[in-house]
Image: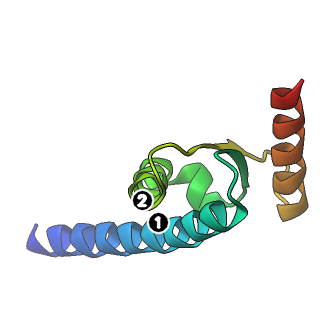
Amino acid sequence: NDDCEIVRYICSSVSKRSARLVAAALASLIIRMGDDNITIGVDGSVYRFHPFFHDLMTEGVKELIPSSYSFKFVLSEDGSGRGAALVAACATEEELK
């Protein structure tokens, strides 16, 4: 039972650190771009299947960007990074219409 708790703690810590690192990179890009409303295309099995990764990333980005900025993550369903970029571009185009 103690071993399970230790493994759970380690997995939780690694997940939080990973989400925070991604959030820091995204927040830096959002601020650098200067766009106050942005859509971010996301791809990957960790984001797709981890039960809390989306929430951890969202929380991390919100802590690092000005409160006047808004963003959303859009999951790419096709399994390629190019697909994620295309989904984000399409979502942004729809918002502009």
At x 56%, y 51%, the residue is 49
At x 9%, y 72%, the residue is 2
Residue 4 in the image: above or below residue 45: below
* 67 on left or right of 4: right
**Badge 1 element:** helix
Residue 82 horizontal/vertical position (percent): 90, 60
**Disc 1: which residue:** 19
| Quadrant in which the N terminus appears | bottom left
- The figure's colour scheme reads rainbow
Number of numbered discs visible in the structure rendering: 2
Closest to the camera, between mark 1 and mark 2, is: 2
| Quadrant in which the C terminus appears | top right
N-terminal-most mark, 1 or 2: 1
* 67 on left or right of 33: left
Residue 8 horizontal/vertical position (percent): 25, 67
* 51 or 71, nearer to the observer: 71
At x 85%, y 60%, the residue is 80
The amino acid type, in three-letter code, at marker 2 is Gly
Is the Cβ of the residue at disc 1 closer than 8 Å to that at disc 2?
yes
- Judge the density around disc 1: few (<14), some (14-19), many (≥20) Cα neighbours within 10 Å: many
User: What's the CA distance linking mark 1 and mark 2?
Assistant: 7 Å
Residue 75 in the image: above or below residue 81: above
- Say the numbered circle drawn on residue 60: 2
The amino acid type, in three-letter code, at marker 1 is Ala
Q: Residue furthest top?
A: 97
**Badge 2 element:** helix
At x 48%, y 74%, the residue is 21
Q: Residue furthest left?
A: 2
- Judge the density around disc 2: few (<14), some (14-19), many (≥20) Cα neighbours within 10 Å: many
Residue 55 horizontal/vertical position (percent): 43, 47
* 84 or 49, nearer to the observer: 84
